[in-house]
Amino acid sequence: MPQTVSPRLRRKETISAYLFLLPSLVFFLGFVVFPMVLCIVTSFFDANMNANKPDVFIGLANYVELWQDKVFLKALVNTIIIVLVSVPVVCVFSLWVASAIYRMKEGPLSFFRVVFYLPVVTGSVAVTVVWKWMYNNYYGIFNYLLKGAGLIEKNINWLGDPKYALACIIIILLTTSVGQPIVLYVSALSNVDNSLVEAAEVDGATNMQCFWRIKWPQIMPTTLYILVITTINSFQCFALIQLLTSGGPNYATETVMYYIYYTAFKLYRFGYGNAMGVILAIFIAVLSAVQFRLAKES
Amino acid sequence: MSKRNGESRAYRIFSVVVLIFLAFLFIFPLYWILTGALKTPAAINSATPEWVPSELTLRNFQVLFSKRSAPLFQLGALVGPTVPAAIRWLINTVFMAVMAMILTCFTASMAGYALAKKRFLGRYLLFSLIVAAMALPKQVILIPLIREMSALGLYDNIWAVILPTVGWPFGVFLMKQFSEGIPGEMLEAARIDGASEAKTFFSIVVPMIKPGIGALAIFTFINSWNDYFMQLIMLTSSSNLTISLGIATMQAENSTDYGLIMAGAALAAVPIIIVFLVFQKYFTRGITMGAVKG
């Protein structure tokens, strides 16, 4: 076959490629890209569910309103707290679990992998309702156990108390977030070049030195990926809020994602909700970019 | 195997103990769902938890199945016999997950192959678009999507949940990773033999990326089953709900009957956990292949 590609062959290749891509593109452009564009466009309109009332162009008014909306700002702060707590905890926890299990035999290894993935597979609704029961003021096991241990004197209304509600949500979020990072770290750690580790050991390197000098740089791409997906997941925390607290008490657990849902589907303010969506997307994009930059530098 | 990096024996014992403790904590919610579903109201509404149920009952499932009912199926004018709504919700959920899985595997394996092995105009642009879309929060598109679905007459229809799931580009990305491994010479040889593009794809490409398709299938099935937010905004009428959505609705209506809610949670969780356990190997491979290398 000739190595130089003739224009005719190139065109043929392009046509056949797009035929293969066509079914996928229909779905991708129609139900992902088009709504994304629509999201940006609608954010400049006063849009609602009423079909008889046409959307009115209002420029940046939705965005201006956002920064004066106390609930939105509270939601943003809560969301950032969730991200700042859960991302580092998920990363450190899953790295520790992965390094403790990755050299185990196949049986125990898959046992632990499955166990830590279980809350993800169980599904957000099932997980949330059982935690709701465990947090319950009267029938919940947490109050029973903590009282039994003498740590608290009277029952605490965990989800109804602004002091504890957000922390309670974060705990559930953590249990549903570590499954995938553990699987990823296990695979990354078992792909680390063992000859380097052995050579370092011969030279008398300690365990800590082996880890930070040899393994850590090699699993950096995985760490980066985990940072990005955990950030995105934490930003999108929704089901827990909707099913447990509806953002309450007194907006203590209001998150951006839940507030978007509330404005769009309870207040029917589509344009305003979309403006929040755009801001959320920008936040995530900037954070992902920063994480990439930091990871590259170190 | 070589010696274990000189980790001290005490540390290894310590870490196994911690791991077993953590495993216990991670299994506990599921145990609490399953036992709660079988406990009597008295045991559930007691301030002292029954760690092991003293008396088992099917009462919660009986209530779950008698609370609401729905036709078994509706195909145009043809309406099936009335059954407990939870059965209909399970059928809806299985239909949704299976359709999303088949369509995703079909479209993504073709697109992934083209992106990995064909040099065409706009390839770089398209791939960048896919990666960028993956990094954006999926939920952001849901508000515009609901208007789009209303315009298409698909609001409150299970297809309104299926179509965007198929469009989500993770599958294409994953299949591109798997297709990179196909040796170019094999494709070249097929071309010289005069095989058509379609024949090359089905007889050479598909057999080689089969593990990838398996991983994507199970991944899509589980994610679609559990994608609560999308189901919540798209589906409203009682007979169109999915099992997660149905349980959430029941929870809102009977928030204090934990036995009933646990029975619902068990019904939603057990089938998908069984699927996960059976196909766990494929699943793990899908997660790891989709991550790095990109």
Image (tube, coloured by chain):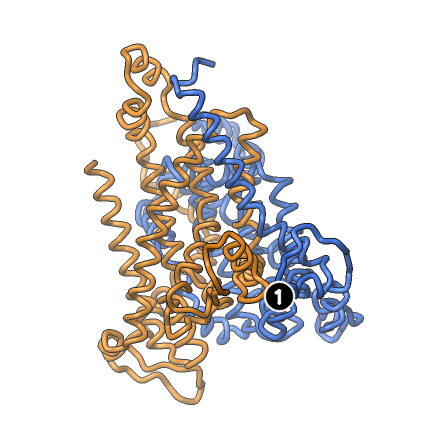
Task: Establish if A279 lies above or below A210.
Answer: below
Q: Is A162 positioned to the left or the right of A125 in the image?
A: left
* Pick the front one: B205 or A131: A131
Q: Is B32 positioned to the left or the right of B128 in the image?
A: right
Tell me the colour chain B is drawn in: blue
Q: Is B65 positioned to the left or the right of A256 in the image?
A: right
* Residue B242 % position (x, y): 62, 64
Q: Check disc 1: other Cα within 10 Å, few if <14, some if 14-19, many if 20+.
A: many
Image quadrant containing the N terminus of chain A? top left
- Most extreme residue toward the right, as rendered? B81
* Pick the front one: B237 or A37: B237
* Residue B178 % position (x, y): 46, 36
Q: Which chain is orange?
A: A
Q: Which element carries disc 1, helix, strand or loop?
A: helix
Residue at coordinates 56% horizontally, 42% vertically from top-left? Answer: B24
Residue at coordinates 63% horizontally, 62% vertically from top-left? Answer: B243
